[in-house]
Image (cartoon, rainbow, N blue to C red):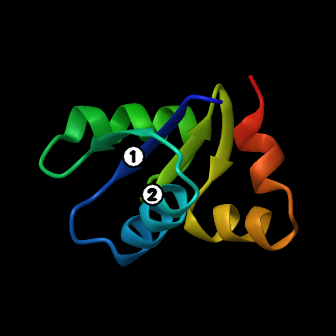
Amino acid sequence: MSQVIIYTSAWCPYCIRAKQLLTSKGINFQEITVDGKPELRAEMEEKAGSDPVPQIWSNEQHIGGCDDLFALEQAGKLDPLLAAN
């Protein structure tokens, strides 16, 4: 199982949807909430090259945001990506 990290904001509906999808697949993930933490948001932006939340990684591979996560799911590519070591 891969290590999944997701940067989120508490009031972001896209963050909620992304976490729901991961949870429905039984994927444990590390959530890093950026609310009121400019240093964490800056870290996320530097790593992702973008500042909207969520930003999601599987192992060291940047997946992108919620739409990217759901696009992988729709294409049948998310499960293999998440199963990778």
Q: Residue at x 27, y 59 (%)?
A: 9
Q: Quadrant of residue 29?
A: top left
Q: On the picture, is 13 further left or further right than 72?
A: left
Residues 83 and 13: in front is: 83
Amino acid type, callout 1: Tyr
Amino acid type, callout 2: Pro
Q: On the picture, is 55 further left or further right than 81?
A: left
Could you tell me residue 15's position as x and y percent? 40, 65
Q: Quadrant of residue 69?
A: bottom right
Within 10 Å of the Cα at label 1, are there few (<14), some (14-19), or many (20+) other Cα atoms?
A: many
Is residue 4 shown above or below 67? above
Residues 35 and 22: in front is: 22
List the single residue furthest toward the left. 36
Q: Quadrant of residue 82?
A: top right
Q: Give the secondary structure at mark 2.
A: loop
Position of the C terminus by quadrant: top right
| Residue 22's disc number | none
Within 10 Å of the Cα at label 2, are there few (<14), some (14-19), or many (20+) other Cα atoms?
A: many
Position of the N terminus by quadrant: top right
Q: Residue at x 75, y 66 (%)?
A: 73
Q: Disc 2 designates what residue?
A: 54
| Residue 7's disc number | 1
Mark 2 touches mark 1? (CB < 8 Å): yes
Q: Give the secondary structure at mark 1.
A: strand
Could you tell me residue 56's position as x and y percent? 54, 47
Q: Residue at x 46, y 40 (%)?
A: 28
Work out how far the residue at label 2 is from the one at label 1, CA to CA, in angstroms: 5 Å
Q: Earlier in the sequence, mark 2 or mark 1?
A: 1
